[in-house]
Image: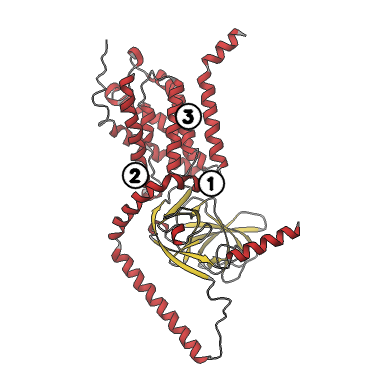
């Protein structure tokens, strides 16, 4: 576990930086704003203590909130998916997680599994996000549309990003 | 009892999750745009430097467009000036009312960061308290309403954009004078809604909507947009869809107005309210 702290700290910072500097500026056609910082929550090792997962997700959400003046919004959505993630992994798993130390990344689990995993969690995250911002408007349909489009976009970005991340740590020894 | 404790222990992470969610949602619901802007300003100082540099670089590529816009504006101003001179020449006894001059000081600023896709949008300007910018100063783009300053740091300031569901501007139909409340509904960056216009008022598409002057923030008569359509929402009032004059997707240079009489107005109103209690 110890040798995971540094790469994950870097991932946390990297994801926040990428979101703030790059992805927050992508606002094409008024509907697209991807939030691939969720990658961090998705890639936490499966055996991370649940409280730690929740804390990290909350912290990540708050940091993103601060950078986009939406105090509490991303924190709420990110904490929610961090909470649901273990249950989803249990439901989705097609093979045994030996020792549960595995990072559920694409290299580890294959494209099909990762696609389902990513889409479901991102869908929940974005639905929460966009519906919360819509509570003051009568425009639920607009928000649902945005949530759907951005779910696809963010998931695509996350899956693409996984081609470049954690190249070495993916080779976890399996008995 | 033991069983209960054990049950709680098993589900402690659920309780922790609920706690975090409640905290997050409470933060979200309770922070109004003013506090959010204030909070973000503290953390934005470093980011502002990066963004200032980035936007300077990007602006270099827009110089031609900006140049043309300035030439146009220059021409309009010269025309207006010439018209004034003609008026004075024909009416030499007319004195310019000193009560009206010197009220507003105009500053120009560059937009170094802008959002239009969220429901609560803000933009950052490169003028701050060191340049004399203070809270609640109105921000105009090409003479049209763009926003209000809500947070100030020494070198930068943040303005709440008209494209922000938290902002309501007192606006009136220029032709008939009926006023209402203009706010953004989050659908398009090009339109907003003008509410509280009485049903019986005759409204045509293309009618100008300007600031009413009933707030202490905006002077009267500043253009906001044109009426696009009427959306009746029942009751005695109708809602009008307004096409905004400011193109928020291409807002790079703005003017910030300083009302030199604002302090006097504020303290007078405060005094009056004190006595009324």
Q: Of circles 3 and 2, which is in front?
A: 2
Residue drawn at x 67%, y 60% as measured from the top left: B270
Q: Position of residue B6 (x, y in %)?
A: 55, 11
* Residue A169 in the figure: left or right of residue A42: left
Give the number of marks. 3
Are dots 1 and 3 in contact, CB under 8 Å? no
Along the viewing direction, whichever of B186 and A60 lies nearer the viewer: A60
Label 3 residue SS = helix
* Residue B272 in the figure: left or right of residue A156: right
Residue B35 - label: 1
Q: Position of residue B208 (x, y in %)?
A: 52, 68
Quadrant housing the C terminus of chain A:
top left
Which is nearer the N-term, disc 3 or disc 2?
A: 2
Which image quadrant for residue A157? top left
Confirm whether circles 1 and 3 share one chain. Answer: no
Q: Rounded to the nearest whole Å, what is the CA distance between mark 1 and mark 3?
A: 25 Å
Q: Which residue is mark 2?
A: A21
Residue A80 - label: 3
Which image quadrant for residue A98? top left
Residue drawn at x 54%, y 50% as measured from the top left: B166
Q: Is residue A79 above or below residue B122?
A: above
Q: Is residue A75 above or below residue B86?
A: above
* Marked residue chain, label 1: B
Asked whether residue B205 appears in the rendered view, the answer is: no
Which image quadrant for residue A100? top left
* Marked residue chain, label 2: A
């Amino acid at each position: 576990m110890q040798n995971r702290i540094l790469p994950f700290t870097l991932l946390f910072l990297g994801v926040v930086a990428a979101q703030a500097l790059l992805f927050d500026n992508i606002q094409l056609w008024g509907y697209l704003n991807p939030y691939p910082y969720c990658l961090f929550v998705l890639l936490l090792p499966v055996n991370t203590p649940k409280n730690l997962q929740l804390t990290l997700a909350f912290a990540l959400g708050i940091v993103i909130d601060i950078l986009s003046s939406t105090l509490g919004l991303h924190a709420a959505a990110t904490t929610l998916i961090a909470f649901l993630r273990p249950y989803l992994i249990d439901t989705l798993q097609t093979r045994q997680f030996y020792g549960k130390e595995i990072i559920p990344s694409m290299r580890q689990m294959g494209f099909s599994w990762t696609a389902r995993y990513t889409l479901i969690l991102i869908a929940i995250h974005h639905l929460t996000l966009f519906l919360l911002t819509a509570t003051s408007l009568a425009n639920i349909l607009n928000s649902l549309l945005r949530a759907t489009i951005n779910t696809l976009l963010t998931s695509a970005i996350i899956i693409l990003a996984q081609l470049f991340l954690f190249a070495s740590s993916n080779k976890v020894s399996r008995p | 009892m033991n069983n209960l404790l054990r049950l709680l222990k098993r589900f402690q992470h659920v309780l922790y999750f609920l706690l975090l969610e409640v905290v997050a949602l409470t933060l979200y619901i309770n922070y109004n745009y003013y506090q959010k802007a204030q909070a973000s300003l503290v953390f934005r100082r470093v980011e502002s430097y990066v963004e200032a540099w980035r936007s300077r670089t990007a602006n270099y590529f827009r110089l031609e467009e900006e140049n043309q816009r300035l030439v146009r504006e220059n021409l309009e101003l010269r025309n207006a000036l010439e018209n004034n001179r003609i008026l004075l020449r024909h009416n030499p006894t007319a004195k310019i009312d000193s009560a009206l001059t010197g009220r507003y000081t105009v500053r120009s600023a560059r937009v170094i960061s802008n959002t239009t896709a969220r429901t609560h949008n803000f933009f950052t300007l490169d003028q701050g308290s060191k340049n004399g910018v203070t809270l609640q100063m109105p921000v105009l783009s090409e003479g049209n309403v763009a926003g209000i300053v809500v947070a100030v740091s020494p070198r930068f300031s943040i303005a709440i954009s008209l494209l922000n569901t938290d902002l309501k501007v007192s606006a009136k139909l220029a032709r008939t004078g009926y006023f209402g409340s203009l706010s953004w509904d989050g659908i398009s960056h090009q339109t907003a809604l003008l509410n509280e216009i009485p049903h019986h008022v005759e409204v045509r598409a293309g009618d100008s909507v300007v600031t009413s002057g009933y707030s202490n923030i905006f002077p009267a008569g500043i253009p906001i947009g044109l009426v696009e359509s009427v959306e009746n929402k029942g009751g005695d009032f109708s809602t009008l869809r307004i096409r905004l004059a400011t193109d928020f997707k291409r807002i790079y240079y703005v003017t910030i107005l300083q009302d030199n009489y604002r302090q006097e107005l504020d303290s007078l109103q405060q005094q009056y309210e004190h006595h009324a209690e």
